[in-house]
Image (tube, helix red, strand yellow):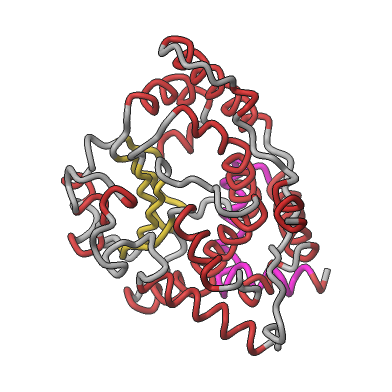
Amino acid sequence: MIELAVHFQTMHQGYPEEALIKFLKARDGNVPKAYKMLVDCLNWRIQNEIDNILAKPIVPADFYREVRDSQLIGMSGYTKEGRPVIAVGVGLSTYEKASIHYYVQSHIQINEYRDRIVLPAATKKFERHVSTCVKVLDMTGLKIAQLSQLKLLTVISSIDDLNYPEKTDNYYIVNAPYIFSACWKVVRPLLQERTRKKIQVLSGCGKDDLLKIMDYASLPHFVRREGSGSSRYSRNSTGEDDCFSLDHSFHQELYNYINQQAEAMALLAPIKQRSFHVDFPLPAQDDCKIAQSIECECQKLSDQNGMANKLDDLTIKEDEEKRKEKA
């Protein structure tokens, strides 16, 4: 129990009651279920050394840049209430430069940096306790072929649901193509009510709607460049402007912080190029239903468009990392 308490301190960052409330909300106020969820989360953190993950850099730097270029996520600023604005390039993320383990490691590191560094800094800056963020999901470039990402995205979603509950206030979906609209119709009824209320599908790039909750400077680059698409289709700007880029200030600060932590723990003498393996949780039954529904809808769209690719050819290979290590 003492070990659990120590890891709970790392997790709650001085606000234990608010942390407990998040687990209660995630289990609809059911105390025994919330308690089990919390204990399972703490054991997951212990078994996978999550408290030390911010001292485990992905190296070398060129390889980490490839991870960043294929897993598009970043922070563009703050809402008017002080919540960090996390941007995600869903449609243009390819997840093709590394194995699933590197992308999961990167995702957890961003989660931990948000919770341990960004949110406490926002609390101090805005002089109010800030414990959540908002996410702007850019669907530019979304294609049926990206069904190959379903397993990885389900793993990441399960990790967030089980170990980082109620960390996002709202999800704003922008630049949604037809394929998203088709899938959204079948997925939306499957979502829990509290999750459904958090999701807003905005018209076009969502600029006018987002300006109601944040200043222009905090808009993600793909929203500010109205009509030009996002990320890879509009990377003629500087990395400082592109919040997905490793050259952006958020990623530079994150990258430097992780390397500094590694040096403090003497982990850079030397570091082998390998991912930080984390146990993948079993996806929840609801997540499985959602994934199956998306597969079915994409299959219908494929058949309608006369596409020859079979869904069985679009799965992530779990042994990808072993294959690369042998090469």
Q: Quadrant of residue 163?
A: bottom right
Q: Quadrant of residue 306?
A: top left
Q: Is residue 233 left or right of residue 35?
A: left
Above or below, 27 relative to 231: above
Task: State the count of labels.
Answer: 0
Residue 107 pos. (x, y %): 56, 58
**Residue at image x 46%, y 63%?**
131
Left or right: 320 as drawn, with respect to 140: right
Quarter-wise, where is residue 216 in the image?
A: bottom left
The residue at the point 33 percent across, 37 percent down is 200
Measuring from the top left, give residue 130's x and y in whole percent. Answer: 42, 66
Residue at image location 67% in from the left, 84% down from the top: 268
Residue farthest right in this picture: 1
- Position in image of residue 97 (x %, y %): 56, 53
Magenta-highlighted stretch: main secondary structure? helix
Q: Is residue 266 left or right of residue 296?
A: right
Nearer to the camera, 104 or 173: 104
In what quadrant of the picture does the N terminus appear?
bottom right
- The range drawn in magenta is 4-32
**Quarter occupied by the C terminus:** bottom right
* 227 w.r.t. 47: above or below: above
Image spot of residue 77 (x, y percent): 31, 65
Residue 122 vertical position relative to residue 314 in the rendered view, above or below = below
Residue 142 belongs to magenta span: no
Q: Residue at x 61, y 69 (%)?
A: 58
Q: Residue furthest front?
A: 327
Pick whichever, 176 or 39, lies toward us.
Answer: 176
